Structure formats: C-alpha cells, structure tokens
Image: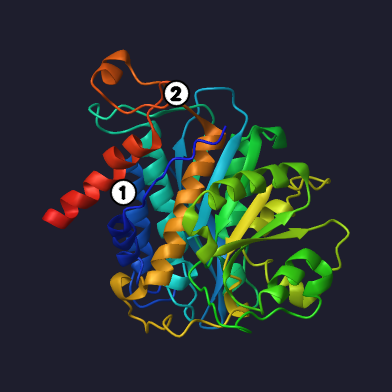
Amino acid sequence: MDVGVCMCQDIYQLENHLERLTQIRNPIAPNDARGTARSYIRGQMQQYGLKLHLHTFNTTVNINGIPTTVLGENVVGVAKGNGDSGGVLVVGADYDTTMEHHPLEDNGAGVGVMLETARNYMAATNPASLDQPARFAVLKTVIFVAFDLNTREYGEAEMGQPGSFHFLHQWLWPFLEQSPENLTGVIILDSITHFNQEPKSQFLPSGFEKTFPKAFEHINEEGMKGNFLAAYIRDSPSSQNLSQAFTTSYLMDRKARLVRLEELKLSDGATVNDRVLQTFNHQAQFHFWTFQPSTQPIPLPAILLTDTGIYRQPGTNDFCAVPCSASQFLSRPRRTALTIITTALTNTLLNLQSQRLPTSSSSSSGGENTDGNGAASPLSFMVATFLLPQLVHLLR
C-alpha cells in the first residue's frame, strides 16, 4: 500500500545537519571534525528515539606514506520492528571525507538526508510527544547507519577495508542471523547534490552503453544532461522490488520532474569494463552486491543513489569554496533535489516497514480530517508534523 504522505521537508532541519558537516573529516585532517561529526550523528539518532549502537573496527590508511592502523566507528541507529525478525531495511551514508573532496558534496549531503529521513520516519512512527500520537505502526526493522573511513575513495595503495565492509560482515550479518531472507535491502546515499540541466554536462565512460543500454538511451535522448538521480541496482527480484518501491514514492512528488530518476540496472551477464566499474565500485552498495561470508557468494539487494560524482559537470551555481556554509551550499536546485530524495526515502520506509494507524474515536469526533478508512489524512499529518514547526521557526 502506498501511503503517499506529503512530508514537506523542514529545510531548516536539513540545513542544520549540513552546518555540522562543513569541514574535512579525515584521519589526517588537522582538526577532529570527523569526531565532531560522529558526536553530532550520535546525538541526533538518540534524540529521534533510535536505539544507538556504536560499531568500532580497525582498518589501514596511508599516513605520510606509512600504512597505519586507524580505529573507525560506524554509528548505527535501529528502529526495531514489532513483527518477525525478517524484512530489515538499511539506509546508509559515509560520514568521513577524503582530503580533496568537498565535505558537503561528498558526502555531507548524503548524511544530512539520511538523518532527516530518520527524523521524519521516527516522527511518524514513534513521536517523542504523547500529544502527537503515532500515525504509523512499525512492523519491520529500519536501520540507519553512518559509515566511517571509506578507504576506497582515499586513492592510495595499501588501504584496509572501509567501514561499510566491516559493518556488513561484523555487525549486520550477525544481526540478520546470517540469513539473506531477513534483509529487504539497503539504500546507500553517496554524492547527491550535482544536477545540471545544460546539454552535454553528463559524461559517460566508454562501455557504459553496453553495461546500461536503457539508461544510455534515456540519457542520450535527454541531450546528455546531468539532470537525473541515478539509482544503481542489481538485476535480481529483491533488488527490483526495492527499486520499484522507491521509484513509486519518488514519482509521487510533483517536483520529481525537476530531477528525474534514472535506474541503472546491472545484469549478471552485463559487459563491465574497468572504466564503467569505477562509476560504482567505491561506494558502500558494492560490498552488498559482492558479499561472500564463506565459500559461496551471497549477493544482497542494495541500491546506490548518486549524481554519478566526477562523471557530471557541476552547474554554474554549484561552486562553493571550502569552507562553505550550509546556507551558501543549499542553492535552490540543491534544496529541491535533497527534499525530493528525503521525501521519497521516508515514504519508501513507511510503505515497506510500517502500517498506517486509524485515528482514535476521540480524535475523529474532534473534527480531525481523516481519509475514508479513518486514517489520518496526508494533509493533517503534513500540517501537524512539518508545517507548524517551520511556522514557529519563522516567527522566532
């Protein structure tokens, strides 16, 4: 069932998240912005009512030319389901950065959207205030995770495995009781702020047309514009089911035409050369696609949501030199794109992991607007949860 709730994102909340992620977050950075960001993510997850888990691991990074063991920490927030153990859905994003990449582009915005999705989901299913009863009952578990130390993007030799790899093998697989049947899928956010309506702003590596023929046709028909959010998936029933749920939620937003959604489906027999592989092998979803806990591989359903990173020419208004404030970074196109993605993610979680609750008889008799089944209408949910807080913010 598609709940179709209009979430109407609080852009001030999203901006607040990004303002905590404006600095380089790397083990060799001169400050401890990585630790500061980690503390902020922890605090937000706890504030939303998520059960906090801190998953530590060791990996290797190259510091001043010397391979060095570094302690990493994945921050995990769990919204436990009330039903069976199966059907776990994970939303994740890397919170560390390289020394070269823009800290908001890669991947502060992904973390911000992940946090805002968590806030919205928990507000709908487990509100902190008893004066605002939950509109949805949690059925299945949702896990929000901020990954540390994506060594795949550091671009140096002798690197250890990234935090997303360790999370999957050491934390998630035991949580799933070592059964792929207990996982609905994983949605990864990585680089989601570059969208360009100019022709020929999208670069495609050689061989892309053979690996993703349908996507190549669509992009070519659009004049090679970087005007789309790419959703990389594996060609499996579980991956396609998850992709379809997200696509349905995404297209319900009337603003989706401003940033179209392009599915890039990787078939098992697809021709994949090194240059095409580089477009998606350094992000977290790749560890789920290639998961092999023992002698046999067990590909797990995972979607990567991305703007394709270096394969897209930035728009003329995208430049924001570091240090760049969140307010400067959040141009109108970026605000539009990030709110569309957050709304679609939230509705995907509500559709797959929860069930709409009927309103109480007292609430209904008090004149609350309900739909034909007695459930709170999308409009009443929108006003109570999102528009009123924004109004209060503006009146301060």
| Towards the viewer: 230 or 378 | 378
Q: Name the colouring of the figure.
A: rainbow
| Horizontal side of residue 148 vs 12, given as left or right | right
Dot 1 surroundings within 10 Å: few (below 14), some, or many (20 or more)?
few
| Towards the viewer: 387 or 173 | 387
Residue at image x 81%, y 67%? 211
User: Which of the image's four quarters has the C terminus?
Assistant: bottom left
Q: Is residue 279 visible?
A: yes
| Residue 188: x %, y % from top left | 57, 55
Q: Which residue is mark 1?
A: 43
Which dot, 1 or 2, sits closer to the camera?
2
Residue at image x 57%, y 72%? 227
SS at mark 1? helix
| Residue 220: x %, y % from top left | 72, 76
| Towards the viewer: 367 or 339 | 367
Q: Is residue 73 visible?
A: no
Residue at image x 58%, y 72%? 153
Mark 2 or mark 1, which is nearer the start of the sequence? 1
Question: What amino acid is labelled 1 in the image?
Answer: Gly
